[in-house]
Structures are given as C-alpha cells and as structure tokens.
Amino acid sequence: MIKWQKNMVKIGALATIVLALAGCSTAKSNGSGQGNNPGKTIKIGVNMELSGSAAGYGQQQKQGIQLAVNKINKTGGIKVGNTKKKIQLVVRDNKTSNTTAASVAAQLVNNDKVVAVVGPAATNAGTASIPNMTKAQVPSVSPSATDPGYTLQKNGDVQKYIFRACFQNNFQGSSAAKFMTSNLKAKNVAILTDNSSDYGTGLTKAFKKTYTGKVVSSQTFQEGDKDFNAILTSLKHKKIDAIYAPGYYSELGLIIKQARQAGINVPIVGSDGMADAKLAKIAGNSNTNNVYYTTPFSTKSGETNTLAAAFLKTYQAKYHTTAPTFSALAYDSVYMIKSAIESEKSANSVKITAGLAKITDFKGVTGTITMNKNHNPEKSMTIEKLTDGAVSQAYTIK
Amino acid sequence: MQTFGQQLINGLSLGSIYALLALGYTMVYGIIKLINFAHGDIYMLGAFWGYYVINQLHFNFIWAMLSAMVFCALLGVIIEYFAYRPLRHSPRITALITAIGVSFLLENGMTYLFTANTRSFPQVIKTVTYHLGGLRISNIQLLILGTACLLMLLLELIIKRTKMGRAMRAVSVDPEAAQLVGININHTISFTFALGSAMAGAAGVLIGLYYNSIDPLMGMTPGIKAFVAAVIGGIGSVPGASVGGFLIGLLETGVQAIGLSAYKDAVVYFVLIVILLVLPAGIFGKKTKEKV
C-alpha cells in the first residue's frame, strides 16, 4: 500500500518535471482526437533501455524487434486493407531513466508520429511514459514490464493504451509458489529478492501470498551486487528445503555459483529474468544443478511450437547465440501489433489500440496469447529445470 | 563460531578489493587534492583487459594481471595528462566535475563498444575449496587476500623507501616547495596516477576471476564504496585506505550476516556520516590547521 503511494508520488513528481520542461517534452493532444496515422510506411517506435543499468535486457529486446521487423518487411510488410506497407522502426534510447523514457515517448508520438510503440523494458520507465502515450492516443506494448499495476490506472481501471507481452508478477510468483509446494515438496524456504526493481519485489510479494510453507529467511540484494557470500553463509546453517530468488541472470548466476561453492545444494527457483544462456556461463555448468525458473518461453518449446523453432533458428543465424526470453517477448510484441493492424484493417494508432485489446488465440513464439480485459496476455507458464547448465526438463503450468 | 569464521573470510576477501581500490583514491587525493571518480572505471577496464588477453592471447593468470596493471597504469597517466593536467590551476570543483565526466565517458564508451551485457570471465585458475576445521576457503580467496596484501606492502615500500616515493610525499606536503628543490611535479603526479591505477587494474582482474562476471558498469558501486573506505581511513593516508577497505568489507558482511541485507549500503553510508562528524580527518588522517 505504502509502495503504491510512493509510486504515485514518484509519478506525480515526474509528471510535474515533465510539464515544467515545457512543450518540447509533453505530448500534444491531437486536435482531431484520432491518434497518429501512418504515412507511406508504418512507423513503429522503440522506447528502449539501450544504455544504463538495464541495457543488457534492452539490447536483447532490440534484437528481437529488429528480427521481427526484418522478417515482416521481407515478405512485403503488413497488410493494411488492400495494400501492403513496410514497417519503419524509430529506435530511441531511454537510458534506463524514467524522465528520459517520458520524453522519448513524447518525441516518438509527436515528432516521429509513430502509430505504435514497443517498450520500455522496465516497469518504472514504462509507467513514466504512460501519460504521454495516453495523451497522443498511441498504444505501447512492453515486452517485459511485469508489475501487476503497470496496465492499470489508480482506480483499478485499465490503462487504455498500455499493453504488455509478458506475464504479470502475480501469476509468475504464485506459479513458483505452487511448484515449490507440490513438485519440490519444499516446506521451509529462504527468499532472496532483487529489491532494486519492482520486478523482484513484486514477485516476492506474489510468492509470499500464495506460498503455504514457512519462509525461514527473507533477504534482499541490489542490482549489480557481486558478493552474496555473507547472505549465503547465514543461510547455510538454517534448515531450508529450497531458495526462491526472483531477479535477473547477472546476479542470479553469481548467487548460484556462490551458493554451490558454499555447500548449499538445495533447489534454487527463480523467474524469467534468469532465462538466459549467460546464467550458466556465469555460474559455471558444474554449479548449475537443481535450478528452476518460471518462463513464458522455453528453448525446449521449439520442439512443439513451429513458430518458436523458426524464431530460434533465425536468431541463432543472425546473432550466433541461443535466443534469450527477452528477445522472444520483444519479437512477439511486434507481431502482436502486426496482428492488430491486420484485424482492424487500419494502421491508425487508435485502431491499433482496439485491435490489441481484442487479440485472441494469437500464435506467438512465447505461446498462444489471448489479451484479457486488463491488457495482460494469457498464456501457459513453463518451468524449466537446469542440470549441468542445460535445460533438462520443462514443466507446463496452465 | 564456524559461521563467524566463515563470515570473517567473506569479509576479508571483499575488503581486500575495496582496499586495493581505496589506495588509488587516497594517493591521488593526497597529491593533487582531487577525488578521482573515474577510478572505479579504471578497475572495470582492468577486468576487461584481463578478459581479452586471457581469451584472445591465452595469457595465464599472472601475466594477465601484470599486463592489466601496466595497461591501467598507462591509462591512468593518459587520463591525468589529458583531463586533469590542463585543469591543475583551476578551482577544485572543476577538476571534480571533469572526473565525473571521465567516469561517464569510460562507462558509456565501454557500453557502446562492448554492449552492456554481463560477460563471464575465463576461469584460468580452477576453484579449489579447502576445508579447515569446518571453514571453507577457496584458493581464489587466498589468492585475492595474498595479492592484495603483497601489493599494499609493495606500495608502502615504494612510497617510503624510493626516491620517487619521497618525491610523492614532498609534492603532497607542499608542491611549490617541492618544485624549488628540484622535483618534477608533472612526473611525480603521473607516477602517482600510474601506481594507483595499477592497483585498480590488479583488483579488476582479481574480481573477474573471483566472481566470474564483468560488465561496463561494474566499477560504479565498488568505486563509491572504496571512496568511502578511503575517507573512513583518512583520505590521503595510505595505511588508512587499506584499513578502511577491510573495515568496509567486514562491515558489509556483518550487516548481511545478521539478516539486514536490505540495509547493507545504508549502513556503510551511515558509518561514513558518523566518521565525518566524529573524526572528520578519518581514522589515520592528520588534523591540519587551515589558515584563514
């Protein structure tokens, strides 16, 4: 509750700053109230964390977006009514800063006249750009903003122009809790949360709500931390059956490495921020055992999902590595916009918004997606198990 | 007791890295009264240098570390020459802001060239964990502690026993008088930057090996923590920086050990505030009278 209020204060303060910075950075209300229209091409904006602390994830998403756009343009573009129009990407860096994200949003909708935006990657930056997107009536699809409140207004109504391609935290956190109780039979757990992002804290909140066992210890860390030995040593002599650690691969890789070296061999369960081949590289293959994470996209899904198989193949060919989850989500974000344009037969931004809200049974790389009334995609959840650094098993949770 | 011993080992390994970094801050401050905020980024560059020479040129660990020290020393001299030397006689705040600018340039330049992705450092030395009476200590932790202590000892010898070291101390006391007795200020300052940066370079390679993860922004937090360590030890004092580094490492570990991991950074900064209030010159700092 307090956090919510704090966020509101933050957003309020931000809005004031944005307004104070005069016309150049606020979205001008379109007189006709019709949003942006496409020109010869369909302009899609990318408001992304390409530098700063979240740049690692932002860059992966940019790769996914680029791949999707290249593929669509190769086949002539998007069918709008009777003509085919190519996509023109306008990529702008929000530097992982909330204020910059808001002004990037304004630039994209006012100056570049984009009809839809992909991004931002993080909930905080995404929330900061909502006012400008709403004012200009241009929809945005975030590949990875997972905070439950992201697509909602203060009063609980849906944010009309805000969509996401990923799960919201509640679903991911509660799935992990259920999995740990029923599959891992864990009665006592320790929680290690990345508390520098809404992502980590949100997941922990959702996890605690659903988990019925005992939380023996709840500790936090910061993004960029490299030394977890102290926390892990203090956990070693407590009786725990498993560790729940929602966060990103850069820190989780180190946690796994240091836990195993300290002789803690209980299962470590995390979230989709871990779904990256670099996790095992950082942790070391021999340490990456008994590790699980919830993810919308499994590299194993290529075995059952032909779209995912094709995506994995093109990604591998272009970037010479296995596609990370963030790229897959970003790839789907572009295709969701495409499907909205095709179903509405118009690339007007207001029409695209309507199309996005109506997405049903959209076949994506990360599963079959139906947009619910709160603009959260409904799709099935996968839990992957890592053994010796490689995915050895995948559990599907509906 | 076992847990306590284990946490002591954790704290000392972490502290030795802070100490190595704090030395660079303290030496540069001692000689030209500049807080070199780019110091943490030199440490990052040392880690990247290690990454490349091990991966591309197949250096072994010792050579990687020595070459990183040379590389960072050169870099420190170049940065001093281009960024700080032209500002030697301008207000201190100008130089300070320039230091922040250099830090941004290095961080974002590296992000541009090598992307912000976290990389895994090549493991040239296989981790072996020794069990000593219930305690676990790895060969890498021993290596870090050993190297850090050796380098600090070496530094102390250079400053106290060599001609250049004497020149450094002279310049830090009174640059003009030093010049009058024939000390080349520019050379002495360059040498100081080289020494401090070499320590940072060594710390970078050690950290890379220990944590197996490097990225262009890795210097930010350790840089600030090391600065705090230097201030707590008494900025300008070389033994103070070493002690300050170990203190910060132990403090951080202790706070996490009692379950207050969320406040570990806050406690470090709180201690900084207390030290500044109670002992403004730091633990080993000399009180100096300022003539007004």
Image: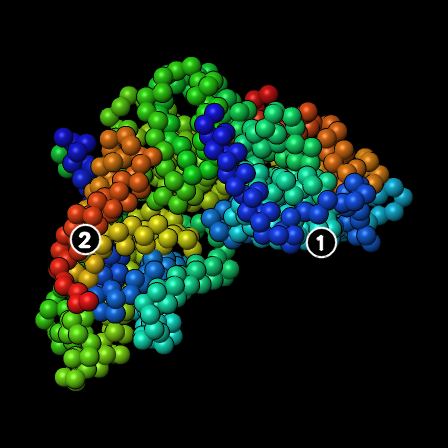
Mark 2 and mark 1 residues within 8 Å of each other at the beta carbon: no
Residue type at mark 1 is: Asp
For disc 1, the chain is A
**Coordinates of residue A74 in the picture (x, y in percent):** 76, 51
Horizontal side of A266 relative to A40 (left or right) equals left
Residue with the most extreme left position:
B161
Image quarter hosting the N terminus of chain B: top left
Whole-percent x, y for residue B229 in the image: 23, 52
The image's mark for residue A275 is: none
Residue A41 horizontal side relative to residue B191, left or right: right
Disc 2 from disc 1: Cα separation? 54 Å
Q: Residues within 10 Å of mark 1 (few under 14, many from 20)?
A: some
Q: Is residue A253 visible?
A: no
Label 2 residue SS = loop
The residue nearer to you, when weighing A230 against B98, is: B98
The residue positioned 82% from the left and 36% from the top of the image is: A344
Q: Position of residue B242 (x, y in %)?
A: 18, 55
Where residue A326 appears, x then y in whole percent? 57, 41
Q: Which residue is mark 2?
A: B280
Q: Residue at x 34, y 35 (%)?
A: B262
Q: Residues within 10 Å of mark 2 (few under 14, many from 20)?
A: some
The C terminus of chain B: image quadrant? bottom left
Which residue does the image show at 39% across and 66% down from the upper left? B98
Chain of the residue under label 2:
B
- Number of on-image labels: 2
Q: How is the image coloured?
A: rainbow
* Local secondary structure at mark 1: loop
**Residue type for callout 2:** Pro
Q: Residue at x 50, y 29 (%)?
A: A4
Residue A123 appears in the rendering: yes
| Residue designated by label 1 | A112
